[in-house]
Amino acid sequence: MVKRSVVKKPLFRKTLNKAITAKEIYKKQIPRVKEEMARNIDRILRTEPPKSKQLKYKGFPNKSIQSLEILKTNKAYEDKLITLEMKKKSAERAIRREKKMRTSPLVGSIRLLHAGKPVRQRLARISQRKKTKQKNSP
């Protein structure tokens, strides 16, 4: 038989009281928390990038309003909102990076850095062709 430790009554009563007071405090705080949550959600909805610019990758809300509805019911909503904002920022950064890459003259060299060997060889051949064309042109 396993010995069970007997819970002393006063200790138990104390923890019960603490739990009850915590519950009451939480009840009092709920409206304030809800207001804060609503404010955060409004802010996110206002700063939402237009649909065309949204990147569709895992975790980025392209159905933002629905995902926010789910968030409202979630207890850890603050963390979720923070991660949502971070993801949004990183997505915007990625979009900006894409634009830069499209317009910058360094595109080839950037591609070379991140490409595999066959791609590098092909790009090198293309650039070589361009150089020879420039040399041969009168």
Image: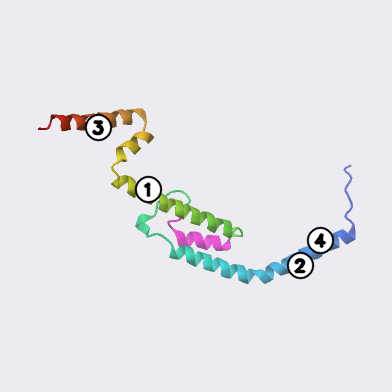
Decide: marks 2, 3 in contact (CB < 8 A)? Answer: no
Residue at 31% x, 40% y: name it: 106
Tell me: 119 left or right of 45: left
Residue at 69% x, 67% y: name it: 26
SS at circle 3: helix
Whether residue 13 is visible to the viewer of this picture, yes or no, is yes
Quote the CA–CA distance across marks 4 and 1: 55 Å
SS at circle 2: helix
Q: How many marks?
A: 4
Residue 1 included in the magenta stretch of the image: no
Q: Amino acid at mark 2?
A: Thr
Q: Nearer the viewer, mark 2 or mark 3?
A: 3
Q: Which residue is mark 4?
A: 15
Give the extent of the magenta segment: 61-73
| Labels 2 and 4: the sequence-earlier one | 4
- Furthest toward the left, the residue is 138
Whether residue 60 is visible to the viewer of this picture, yes or no, is no
**Quadrant in which the N terminus is drawn:** top right
